Amino acid sequence: MWRYLYSALLYLLTPAIACRLLWRGRRQPEYWQHLAERLGFYPKRPAAPVLWVHAVSVGETRAAQPLIEALQRRWPGYRILLTGMTPTGRAAGAEVYGDGLDQVYLPYDYPPAVDRFLRHFSPVFGVLMETEIWPNLLAACQRRQVPVVLANARLSARSARGYQRFSALLRPAFAALAGAAAQSAADAERLQALGVGAVDVCGNLKFDVSPPADKLALGAQWRLALAGRAVWLAASTRQGEEALILAAWRQLALRDSLLVIVPRHPQRFAEVADLLVNEGIPFARRSDRLPQPADAVWLGDSMGEMVAYYALAELAFIGGSLAPLGGQNLIEAAACACPVLLGPHTFNFQRASEDAVAAGAARRVADASELLRAVNALLTDKKATALMRTAAVDYAATHRGATLRTVSFIAQRALPAAH
């Protein structure tokens, strides 16, 4: 009954969903492309049997790389179908995988749409990256006997409490999963409490993602071009954080250092540029040119180059953590040997953040003022920065191996006949 009520509400919200899609398309016209796929209509089906992997956006798409490559090696006779929900995720998939797999949008969770998706592609099994729970989709998969596994599954205490409030609707969806490969023991415990039957702790796939050599080389080229200038990075910043950082920067920053700001969402590039103009701060945009000595800020308005920014910077603040937004992934920075500074709010990446701090690869700050004091201290103390850089590399190396454990778990839970 609760799923029927959920579906009815979804239909009632259709005009709002359409308006939001149209509104987002004003800033990102790519949202207006492939609209039929969002309702479960697709032009063609791969000739080979399909293994389906869902990665909602950019972060999950990149994190899925070692898993997808391992699935391709283990079952070469199958074709990977990668679904997502955002144009940026789709673009990241095209960049990472090229023609090595098929990409489409996962339809919205309308019963007829998910039925059309499953009927069209007939996947042998599905892998949902992290925690993507759609009641109608999972009910349809269970009805059609398509096993679905959560991979790289994480669930913060806050999110678990939110799911519990709607347990009548969501508990059957969690129970419909064939299993969950959790990032940590705490994630596993929370997933089991919500109804997932088979859970195993497999670790975080993001540790197995190797930084692309061409992006590392690009960052090294930028560093040479800056002729020894001190550089620090504010990575994946979210709404309101740039203003906090710039206010503290005016008071505390080393005046000859360069601040590189890379907003988390591309639709905010222009907004942050306007902020810099209004603040009277000299800056350059990545899309225009390299920064000059007179520029205090370089705005990273590009996609798919975060590794290059980490390779350029002497240290990085990870956004989403000054404001109570849960933080962003710090693992990529560690893999690039970039020391990390974190704000107080990292509940979406709690285990990875705590482990990085314990390993000496990251430091936590309470607010923007403390962040700038830490930046100044590390930019002037090269020995401390070098120690953090070594700790970051060791931290990243220590936690590798999640891919093999996850593939083994998928084989046991989703495709036992193909061991």
Image (tube, rainbow, N blue to C red):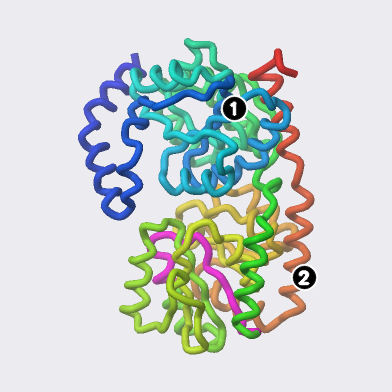
Distance from disc 1 to disc 2, alpha carbons, whole Å, reads 44 Å
In this view, the residue in front, 380 or 271, is: 271
For the C terminus, the image quarter is top right
330 within the magenta span: no
Mark 2 is on which residue type?
A: Leu
Q: In the image, is residue 408 above or below residue 402?
A: above
Q: Which residues are magenta?
A: 228-244
Residue indicated by mark 2: 387
Disc 1 packing (10 Å; few <14; some 14–19; many ≥20): many
Q: Is residue 201 visible?
A: no
Measured as percent of width and height from the top left, residue 283 is found at 43, 80
Measured as percent of width and height from the top left, residue 250 is found at 45, 83
Measured as percent of width and height from the top left, residue 369 is found at 50, 75
Residue 79's mark?
1
Residue 191's mark?
none
Q: Which quadrant would residue 396 be assigned to in this image?
A: bottom right
Check disc 1 and report its element: helix, strand or loop. Answer: strand
233 within the magenta span: yes
Q: In the image, is residue 221 above or below residue 33?
A: below
In this view, the mark in front (1 or 2): 1
In this view, the residue in front, 413 or 378, is: 413
Measured as percent of width and height from the top left, residue 116 is found at 39, 19
Residue at left offset 62%, top offset 72%? 313
